[in-house]
Image: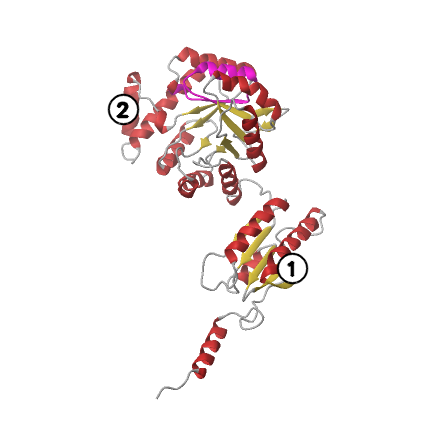
Amino acid sequence: MVGDEAHGFVGIGGDSPVSVQSMTAGYTYEIDKCVAEIHKLAAAGADLVRVAVPEKKDTAALKEILPQVSVPIVADVHFHFQRALEAVEAGVHKIRLNPGNIKDRDQVKDVIQACKAKNLPIRIGVNEGSIIERKDKQKRMKELGGVFSDQKHGHFLAIMIAKLEEYLEIFQDENFHDIVISAKSIDPLLVIDAYKEISSRFDYPLHLGVTHAGPKETGTIRSVVPLGHLLASGIGDTIRISYANDPIYEVQDGLELLYVLGLRTRIGAELIACPTCGRIQVDLFKLVQDVRKELAKEIRVPIKVAVMGCVVNGPGEAEGADIAIFAGDRVGIIYVQGERVATVKEDEILPRLLEECRKFQGQVERGEAKLGEKKVDILPPDPIGELGSGWEKIQKEKSDRNRSLPVLK
């Protein structure tokens, strides 16, 4: 358990839901900015927020930050064991420790005992970029290298396992087992291999992530592929999607990953929409973005909303959604649980769709409707009727044009 009465408790491992973490991007000692960023991440759905404490002024700031926030806070400690001791004294809820860059084993033991006294968990991180090979562990690494010799990432896997064994010996000697393990890499395939090996060897909760994933534009794929694979395999207890971007996106994408895998109950609307195609006859992409933004503001219930741009996929999606719109030639038909409720012009689609979403949300909250129920079967509209689209209409218009052309002699 991470947290306290004031900030709430988050379960890590066991039957607890997978939690989403992120990290503040600013300086912790800038107290007001740090608090504002933590509030922003918590409002987006972060279960835990990590803050950097490289200097004493950062740990000193924790005493003022903690009373102002509402989620458990993790102190990120590297190199200076004193920062961990100061963070514990300040009342932080968890320590992220990299024993690999704290050379004195007695200093690591001091941190362990301080956390043990306060019942605080410790995350042990063995990121690829911070692994240090120690000469006295070469024999064990050579043995593990033989075990992993047939794997692409055998060398790094050997180092990671050896490092974890080395670190865990220290914690076991201190009879401390309130531990979370992470083993991140920039390589998504190494991340998959590493966590599979670790999960089969160590009975501790695992924190998943890809380090240095890059900007959101490319980091999304780099992160979601390995994390999705591992989570779908039952591996992982907490996650952080890391972007060189506003950390709010880390929280949003982390939650969406858990939602689509069925590992968390969705809060707010689920939006599905058409991809690009030549059949669209409304400004679908602007409409989708406008719908997304407005739903995020007003909808709390996990309503499934479909925004479709033509009659090809529209009827099927309308049947599977609670609220659906599918459009034709500058008009749209709106359905609520399969029942047609309106046909509106293009400029009226957004306000009417939002009106129906608000109305349906109220019905669900009052117990007058249930999510996912379908009232009627939807029949596709006449493709040359009110939507004014379809192959038959195109052929007809082509034939009409041909008849109107002058005959050349």
Q: Is residue 255 above or below residue 348?
A: above
Q: Is residue 269 visible?
A: no
- Residue found 42% across the figure and 20% down from its top: 78
- Magenta range is 76-100
* Quarter of the image with the N terminus in it: top right
Q: Is residue 98 magenta?
A: yes
Q: Which residue is mark 2?
A: 142
Asked whether 196 or 60 is in front, the reply is 60
* Label 1 to label 2: alpha-carbon separation: 65 Å
When the figure is inspected, residue 236 is found, relative to residue 273, above or below; the finding is: above
Q: Is residue 359 left or right of residue 287?
A: right
Kindly identify the amino acid type of the residue bearing the numbered disc 1: Lys
Q: Nearer the viewer, residue 145 or 89?
A: 89
Percent across and percent down for residue 190 are: 35, 35
Q: Hey, which residue is sitting farthest top in the picture?
A: 106
Amino acid type, residue under disc 2 in the picture = Lys
Task: Give the residue at mark 1.
Answer: 375
Q: Quadrant of the C terminus?
A: bottom left
Disc 1: CA contacts within 10 A as few (<14), some (14-19) or many (>=20): few
Does residue 119 sit above or below 281 in this rendering? Answer: above
| Furthest residue toward bottom | 409
